[in-house]
């Protein structure tokens, strides 16, 4: 039985680092994040750990040291990356390795903006560590993005200080266990104080780390409600992807992605880009998988998650993992970053769930409150027809079985074209369902290849996704028994 990890205070962590004669480096903090190095100075023994501590609070001084950012933003990933690179290079340049043969060098950096005086802009920031685990070894880098939830600048600064200590401590004492490192960032903190919505690990000690799995852990552990990663598997910060974009999202299991999913996104995209408040070059498409969907078979299967992600990424798609079971929460999340027109593509079967009142019992205003949140935004829903294989019935908005009590609301949204049917769908593929395709792959049956888009079958076979090889073995065994 594993013993529960003892959580040290920030002072204890800082002191343990200070008393380690092999850890030596610099601190550089921009903006409101002037709290991290203070813990190390106050805990004692800092002279053995801190080669330099600096603050480039003034923008001109910051630019003179680290260069100008192309977008003129100071609280951004590019800035903290430049800080880490510049300061770490100075350590290597200025400290003679012969004089410090056992030292593992590090640089801690952050760029933070706390809540403004009018309390109209919530605080956020970036922090990172570039560090060695052995002398003369290439350094690793860990970078995180934070969103502060406390309503006072001084409290946000305190939280930043604690998080910074946790990050540096985790890099040196949990680098062999990335999941534990991630969990340790919340030592002496809570999600109510600060949210981590992006993390990235790289370097020789993290060669086996898949940053997409780290994104998944952020949502699974309740550190954030949504994460995004790019087609090449990089973790992305939401603001960099969604800011002022026309967002078009499709939710599904994508287990695996089928011809129906692709037809939905292609036909929905075609309609969305023709909207007069949509700029085609400004559209951001997202394939969203909810945490509940990932838990459909019990606990989250990380390999199953990666199988889905690998296919979507190979198709050039940006993937969103969220804890937003209800659509109104998803739209509320998008609204943090854009006021432009947004679109949701969903099947009629999903629409029936949206109109199910049981999902809104936690809201004082019930389903009307959720729809108020949805449609007070510039949102349009594109409905894909659904063929019920059990009842052998075909549904569009014209015959969707909405409860009579909610029918006036449904008719209002249809009449005002806040919800519209996708009409040029491919009727030949409506019998395709992901769950049937998955079952065929796992049981070794043939024919599933015609249910998925071109090349997806090759990807599944070549990479043995969704237990393809095991399915082939099962199929052969069944034939032999027969």
Image (cartoon, helix red, strand yellow):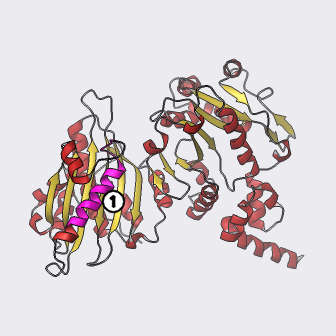
* Picture residue at 73% right of the left edge, 27% below the top: 402
Q: Quadrant of residue 22?
A: bottom left
Magenta-colored span: 72-90
* Picture residue at 83% right of the left edge, 65% below the top: 446
The reply to whether the magenta stretch includes residue 91 is no
Q: Depth check: 462 or 222 in front?
A: 462
The reply to whether the magenta stretch includes residue 84 is yes
For the C terminus, give its image quadrant: bottom right
Q: Position of residue 419 (x, y in %)?
A: 68, 27
Q: Position of residue 107 (x, y in %)?
A: 24, 62
Q: Quadrant of residue 52?
A: bottom left
Q: Is residue 465 visible?
A: yes
The residue that disc 1 covers is 184
* Picture residue at 38% right of the left edge, 59% below the top: 182
Q: Main secondary structure of the magenta part?
A: helix
Does 226 appear above or below 13?
above
Q: Is residue 326 visible?
A: no
Q: Residues within 10 Å of mark 1 (few under 14, many from 20)?
A: many
Given the current orientation, which residue lies at the most extreme right position?
Answer: 482
């Amino acid at each position: 039985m594993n013993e529960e990890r003892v959580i040290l205070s920030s002072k204890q962590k800082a002191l343990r680092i200070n008393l380690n004669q092999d850890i030596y480096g610099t601190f550089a903090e921009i903006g409101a994040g002037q709290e991290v190095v203070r813990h190390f100075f106050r805990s004692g023994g800092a002279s053995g750990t801190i080669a330099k501590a600096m603050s480039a609070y003034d923008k001109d001084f910051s630019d003179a040291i680290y260069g100008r950012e192309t977008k003129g933003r100071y609280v951004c990933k590019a800035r903290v990356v430049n800080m880490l690179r510049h300061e770490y290079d100075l350590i290597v340049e200025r400290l003679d390795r012969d004089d410090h043969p056992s030292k593992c060098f590090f640089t801690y950096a952050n760029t933070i903006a706390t809540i403004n005086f009018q309390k109209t802009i919530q605080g956020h920031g970036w922090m990172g560590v570039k560090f060695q685990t052995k002398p003369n070894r290439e350094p690793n880098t860990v970078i995180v993005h934070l969103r502060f939830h406390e309503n006072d600048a001084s409290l946000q600064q305190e939280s930043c200080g604690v998080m910074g200590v946790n990050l540096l401590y985790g890099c040196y004492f949990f680098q062999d266990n990335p999941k534990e490192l991630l969990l340790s960032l919340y030592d002496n903190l809570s999600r109510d104080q600060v949210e981590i919505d992006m993390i990235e690990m790289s370097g020789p000690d993290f060669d086996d780390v898949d940053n997409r799995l780290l994104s998944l852990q952020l949502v699974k552990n309740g550190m954030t409600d949504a994460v995004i990663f790019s087609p090449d598997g990089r973790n992305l910060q939401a603001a960099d992807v969604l800011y002022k974009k026309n967002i078009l999202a499709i939710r599904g299991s994508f287990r695996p992605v089928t011809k129906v999913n692709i037809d939905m996104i292609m036909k929905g995209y075609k309609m969305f880009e023709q909207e007069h408040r949509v700029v085609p070059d400004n559209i951001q498409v997202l394939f969203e998988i909810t945490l509940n969907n990932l838990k459909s078979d019990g606990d989250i299967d990380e390999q199953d998650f990666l199988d889905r992600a690998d296919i979507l990424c190979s198709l050039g798609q940006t993937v969103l993992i969220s804890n937003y079971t209800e659509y109104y929460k998803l739209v509320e999340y998008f609204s943090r970053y854009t006021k432009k027109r947004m679109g949701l593509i969903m099947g009629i079967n999903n629409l029936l769930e949206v109109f199910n009142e049981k999902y809104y019992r936690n809201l004082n205003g019930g389903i009307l409150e959720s729809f108020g949140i949805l449609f007070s935004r510039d949102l349009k829903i594109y409905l894909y027809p659904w063929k019920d294989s059990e009842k052998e019935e075909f549904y569009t908005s014209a015959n969707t079985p909405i409860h009579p009590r909610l029918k006036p609301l449904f008719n209002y949204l249809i009449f005002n074209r806040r919800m519209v049917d996708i009409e040029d769908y491919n009727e030949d593929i409506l019998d395709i369902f992901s769950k049937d395709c998955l079952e065929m792959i796992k049981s070794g049956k043939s024919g599933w290849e015609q249910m998925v888009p071109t090349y997806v079958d090759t990807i599944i076979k070549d990479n043995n996704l969704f237990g393809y090889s095991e399915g082939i073995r099962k199929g052969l065994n069944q034939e032999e028994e027969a």
